[in-house]
Amino acid sequence: MIILYIMLEPRNHIKVFVSSTVYDFESHLDYIYSTLDGYGYDVMMSHKGTIPLDSKLSNLENCLKGVENCDVFLGFIRPLLGTGVLDRNQKSITEQEFDVALRVNMPRFVMADYRVVFARQFLKMMQIPIQDVPYSFNQTTQDGKETVKPNRVVHAASLEMYDIAIQSNILPATARVGNWVQSYKNLQDIALHIEAQFKDAEQIKKLLDRHE
Amino acid sequence: MNNIAPSFVDTLLNQKPGSVHLTRFTEYDADRVLQMVCAYLNHEGGWIIVDTDSLFADVQGKIAELQSKTALLIRPLPLVYIHEEYDNGHPVILLTVMKGGLPPYSYKSKYYIEKSNKIIAPGKDDINLLLRQTFPVSTWELSTHLLAEWEDLDESLMQSVLEKGWEKGRVDRSCKSPEELLGNLNLKDITYIKNGAVALFAHDISHLLPQCKLRIQVMLGGKSSESFQDVYFLEDNLFALSQKVHDYFLNRLPMVSSFSKEEWDSSNQHVYPLDVVDEAVTNALIHRDFSSVVDEVLINIYSDRMEIVNPGEMPKDIVKKKSIILPHISTPRNPLMAEIFYVGDKMEKTGRGMKLIHDRMKELNRRLPEWESKKGYTQLTLFRSIRITKLNPRATQFIDALNVGDRFTKKEYMNYWHYELSEATAKNDLAQMVDQGVLIKEGNGPSTSYVVLAKN
């Protein structure tokens, strides 16, 4: 008979909201969910359908309410905004989730794709404002035709999220608090950071006490 | 002496304890089985046998259920081959689980590991250990190709692979597009296309991955011959290469005729069985080392044999004396590319390729194929000739009196003769028969027995 031994951590009932775009990130999100769940956290992640839903609210409202009702925020700044952009003139769902986390001032952990970090540093060096990063650009194909291609390198809004997260507008730099953003290149980088920050639930509880 | 020919499962079960990673479920419980699959994926892979006594006639239904649940509930998409096999004539379900290419794996969003045949849902310390111990197997296929863009990939080919995966239950239909499939396997990261995706699907491969090439050389005069009867050079993505090679051999391999007195009928078959050639070429293409841009897969055709040479040496301890395939879990050099080939039905019996080639040639009474690894290459030789075994008269007489599948011990062999046969002589005879591929030795020490594999 094959026996299942359960050595899971006891549930600590700390709610962690994971905010991220999903495109080409699904396997990473699966991993993040399984690891946090294995550590005993209650993981709120729209990709997994674990955000409590109210049928009287829109998708956006449900997500934002989910952030408000969580204890800890884990956000990923990725190069593209994904499909959660409801209106070009409006912030995406991920951006608004980040805004709520900042407003509520819950303990937050932010990781940024290395391409966002590099692009921000490059633009700064070249003194190119973020607003000048286009949504799309013209390209001439091999047969001489002009086409419009969407920007699929890095969105301006992602760079703005990064700027806000590192609090680049607050000077002097020594006045910045809670502005640590961990750059990642691959799953192993994410794994190390999540392990370091979340493996000890008592540490997270102390953070919650300080944020009350 | 038993009369049932040993199946693959029989062979597995008769291996030295601890030499193969194997779990047996005496009852069908899909959850437990898939938890164990997940645990194996997070370790070195292995085999899982599920007895079917409780399933009556629904074995195929249960196989389909396990297949679809694997595709839906295990993340990331794993490489698991599930099919019906036989243990002493009774049907069982055999799952061949290869070590995952993108660890760690989860089942229903939970991790599982295995220790001493127990499934463990790990606590945080074991999770941390799992994270540290599990890193991607292959780096080449996951490295970003600096020049490739999505438009460089053949979208209709990718779509057909995905549809084949849906049809075979190897990919869940919630994976709706080729972009999603490649993204889930980390072969694509937004605009970054990885080497594995390029090798499998690129339109114009020559400027992107010059090493994706294959050469067929026909040298009927042998290696020392100064002229080639034919040279055929192919350069394309791996799916297209596989098909082009198949078409080449389909159209050009000579046929041989054989006449059966029992059936009073003649049959035509290719001098090298096409299914064997397909399997051998697929293995060479997928398992080769792509890191060198100048290397290629080479097929040399001589008058008496065919050599298929690919860059990269095969793991040690899976082939003994060039022809004997030891039960082993395949550890593909490029597991994610192997997975896409499996999804697209280009690798049917994942993890069993070498054994299939070996068994098929034996079934056709051909000289057994030989594998050799040296100087950074692996060479598979398929022989055209009928197998000739050289046994001493005593061994020949003994084998002639038996049937394929009969089992006996050394003592039974010694007692067979009406004269006294020394133990040393018996040992030599048995060793000779094993060496010639006529017998296979099973077990150790006092429990050692021999099974007839072929008549002389």
Image (spheres, rainbow, N blue to C red):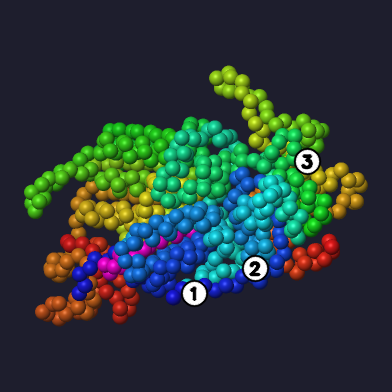
**Local SS, label 3:** helix
What residue sits 67% from the left and 27% below the top?
A137
Whether residue B40 can be seen here: no
What residue sits 36% from the left and 63% below the top?
B93
Residue B124, disc = 2
Residue B16 falls left or right of residue B425: right
Question: Relative to B353, does residue A134 appear above or below in the rendering?
Answer: above
Residue B36 falls left or right of residue A27: left
Mark 2 is surrounded, within 10 Å at the Cα level, by few (under 14), some (14 to 19) or many (20 or more) other residues, namely many
- The answer to whether dots 2 and 3 both sit on one chain is no
Would you name the residue on which mark 1 appears? A3
Type of the residue with mark 3: Glu
Type of the residue with mark 2: Lys
Q: Gap in Å between the C-alphas at discs 2 and 1?
A: 20 Å
Mark nearer the N terminus (3 vs 1): 1
Start and end of the magenta stretch? B86-99
Q: Which quarter of the rendering shows the C terminus of chain B?
A: bottom left
Q: Gap in Å between the C-alphas at discs 3 and 1?
A: 51 Å
Chain under callout 3: A
What's the magenta bit mostly, secondary-structure-wise? strand
Residue B65 falls left or right of residue B370: right
